Amino acid sequence: MSEGEFRALRDIIREEFGLYYDDGKQFLLQSRLALRLAKAGLESFDAYSAMLRNPRTRETEMRELTSVLTNNETYFFRERAQLKALVGGVLDEIRGGVRVRPLRIWSAACSSGEEPYSLAMTLMESGRLRPDEFEIYASDISDRVLELAQRARYQSLSFRATEPGMLQRYFEPVGHEYRLKDEVRRHVRFFRLNLLDQQALSGLQEMDAIFCRNVLIYFDRVTQKRVVESFAQRLTERGYLFLGHAESLFHLTDYYEPILQPDTIVYRRRAKEARA
């Protein structure tokens, strides 16, 4: 991959997905795209750029491209302190007042499903909500991981933070895998979504909380700001945003205020009049 080919592809990927490959990641991008070139029968990265720009092939190839660009490493009950915060003070606040609909939580970039299923199990275990009092929405840009999430069969690596009792209660062994029981699966609704697609985002219902963890680290600051502020438009007044432990909104936006919880920080949407 020449420098010119790298920059052309980097710009296409940044515009479509928000993912940014700096100059030090040319070899990484080359290695990830090499398989797509081979499968498409192309001999150069310039030809692949043309394929991504061609209206006849763009949409199909962009959907394939997501499977090689995204990092889908995850596991059940990741960053457990945030799950405890959700069913503690956060739940108390977002359930305050008269509620005429179920609690809505969105796992944005849900990968192979461990995060939204963990949210469902955490709420079920809390004993604070009836089964009809909460809904989990789960989106990802990759068709491949969404298929895995809806299949709901997992191997041992996904359970490295799962207590044995939870594994026994909510999963059934099937060969070398574990299948999630339907009592959990029925709470989660999966759909494909590009977080940069403003039209698609505007069609979502209002959410009480959004989990978007370990995603912003792959975006530049301009895209980070765009994404988290679009989340604010989908949150209820004073709804909550949960980010990964290595991510922060510091000096990025005034749409949220940080709320200190035991062993973690979460972000609450600010009312318009309270923004700087």
Image: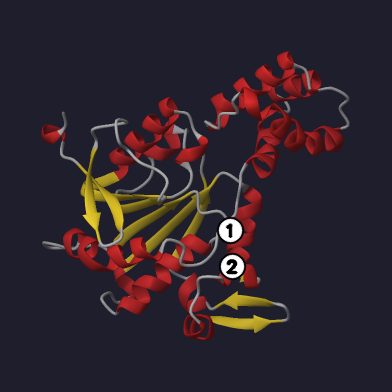
Q: Secondary structure at mark 1?
A: loop
Q: Residue placed farthest to the top in the image? A: 4
Looking at the image, do the residues carrying marks 1 and 2 touch, with CB atoms under 8 Å apart?
Answer: yes
* Quadrant the C terminus occupies: top left
Left or right, residue 158 beside residue 37: left
Task: Give the mark nearer the N terminus: 1 vs 2.
Answer: 1
Residue 45 is tagged as none
Q: Position of residue 132 (x, y in %)?
A: 32, 72
Identify the image quadrant of the N terminus: top right
**Residue identifier under label 1:** 112
- Where does label 2 land, which residue? 158
Q: Nearer the viewer, residue 224 or 147?
A: 224
Secondary structure of the residue carrying numbered label 2: helix
Residue 215 visible in the snapshot: yes
**In the rendered image, which quarter is residue 85 located in?**
bottom left
Considering only vertical position in the picture, is 98 above or below 208? below
Point 52% across, 37% down: residue? 218
Residue for point 55% across, 32% down: 19
Nearer to the camera, 35 or 61:
35
* Residue 69 image offset from top left, x and y in percent: 65, 39
Q: Residues within 10 Å of mark 2 (few under 14, many from 20)?
A: some
Quarter of the figure with residue 254: top left
- Mark 1, other Cα within 10 Å: few <14 / some 14–19 / many ≥20: many
Q: Is residue 101 left or right of residue 231?
A: left
Q: Residue at x 42, y 56 (%)?
A: 137
